[in-house]
Amino acid sequence: MDDDRAILRSGSRQPREQDGGLGISSAPPHNAAPGTSPGAVIAREPRIDILRGCALLTIVINHLSQVAEAGGLTSGLFPTPTRYGYSTAAELFVILSGYMVGLVYLARPQPILAVLKRAATLWLYNFALLAAVFPLAFLMSAIELDFWRFNDLVNDPLNAIVRMGALQQAPRLLDILLLYVTLMLIAPLAIVIHARSPRVVIAASATIYVVAQILTIKRIDGSPTATDDGILKLLSWQVIFFVPMALGARRLHLALFRWLETHRTPLVLFVFLFLAGALLKTWEAPAPEWLTPRYGLHLLRLGHAILVLMLYTALLTAARRLLHTPPARMLATIGRHSLDCFAAGVLATYVLALTWDRAGGGHLVYYLSVLTAVTLTALVAWWRESARKPRHRHRATDNRT
């Protein structure tokens, strides 16, 4: 019962719920924890939901900032960790997604089937997003079509749709779910290996990452136009999905939160390292060529992503008395409905980007666009949460009956 008490201490006494977006709960099912009685109620861990909410909002802001930068704005952009570091929120999103697969799906009776069903849902969501944004292509200029990677879709739509269905390519922003679906389809193999030895999963994933980095460096060094796109990108990014999956199966967050609750030195260290990295980024300190963005998920980018995750975790633990304030609850709600909120953020980014350009660009329109996108994301989360509550109340009444 120690694990169960730790979960109850770390979060609010809410019933275990399904995530409205990814179909995953932030707490394992009651039969996953050894020694847990069948009737035990395990609360959600709000800090995990908040982390996911932070990652999603940062992704939305970063996407609109990329549009603004492409349009000529180089200053006055929202100061997300990406502005002052070497990673983006996408890494955090993938890390947390892999962790949730290990935490929840591996505790289910048929984890492989559950993962494949989720992959199918994500694949369908991506095509729904494509259908929603495709009409906007007829409003785009040639430069915009190139920026959003819509040229193939406009020139040869059938071939582009087939390639997207085969997980080979997708327009800008839709490639995130493409990567996620691919990782989920590979997950059954990792689950089979994990059942025999979790350490083998971690070791194999880390080895593949190292090999992928070596091959990426050789490929890019050999051509001034080469990138890590394709199989090398997948082989690199899998490390921040499958290693967290193995750690999620061991419920590492319980020990991590307990440790951070009793130690303050790690928070000071994480803040120091983050600020040091921000200064180096701001001063444009020289770095080896293979530690630049062109080389994909290089070691510096990977290390910074882990640092940001640990910094967020330590800050949320130090400020745990604020976890039930309205802003924190809103972030947690966004995290619980991550897939719907992500899809809404992508659609809002496309529409607001075109609006920003046609409104003359500038900082004011950029700030209004970010505010609108964040508000829409929060409204989608609120709507999904409100739509779910009556069903939970109905089920509770049925159970009492």
Image (cartoon, rainbow, N blue to C red):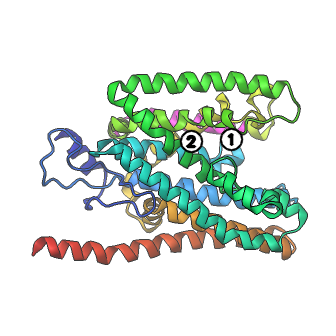
**Quadrant assignment, res 386:** bottom left
Q: Which residues are magenta?
A: 261-279
Q: Nearer the viewer, residue 49 or 157?
A: 157
**Residue at left offset 67%, top offset 25%:** 213
Q: Identify the secondary structure beneath mark 2.
A: helix
Q: Is residue 129 left or right of residue 367?
A: left
Q: Is residue 116 left or right of residue 370?
A: left
Q: Nearer the viewer, residue 301 or 238?
A: 238
CA distance separating discs 2 and 1: 9 Å
Residue identifier under label 1: 85
Residue 238 x, y percent position in the rendering = 56, 35
Q: Is residue 285 above or below residue 162?
A: above
For the N terminus, the quadrant is: top left
Residue identifier under label 2: 308
Q: Is residue 123 above or below residue 369?
A: above
Q: Identify the secondary structure beneath mark 1.
A: loop
Q: How would you rate the neighbour count of disc 1 (Cα within 10 Å): few for under 14, some for 14-19, many for 20 or more?
A: many
SS assignment for the magenta stretch, majority: helix
**Residue at left offset 41%, top offset 48%:** 115
> Does 263 appear in magenta?
yes
Do the CB atoms of the residues marked 2 and 1 lie less than 8 Å apart?
yes
**Residue at left offset 74%, top offset 29%:** 291
Dot 2 or dot 1: first in sequence order is 1
Amino acid tagged 2: Val
Amino acid tagged 1: Gly
Q: Is residue 286 above or below residue 95?
A: above
Q: Nearer the viewer, residue 113 or 341?
A: 113
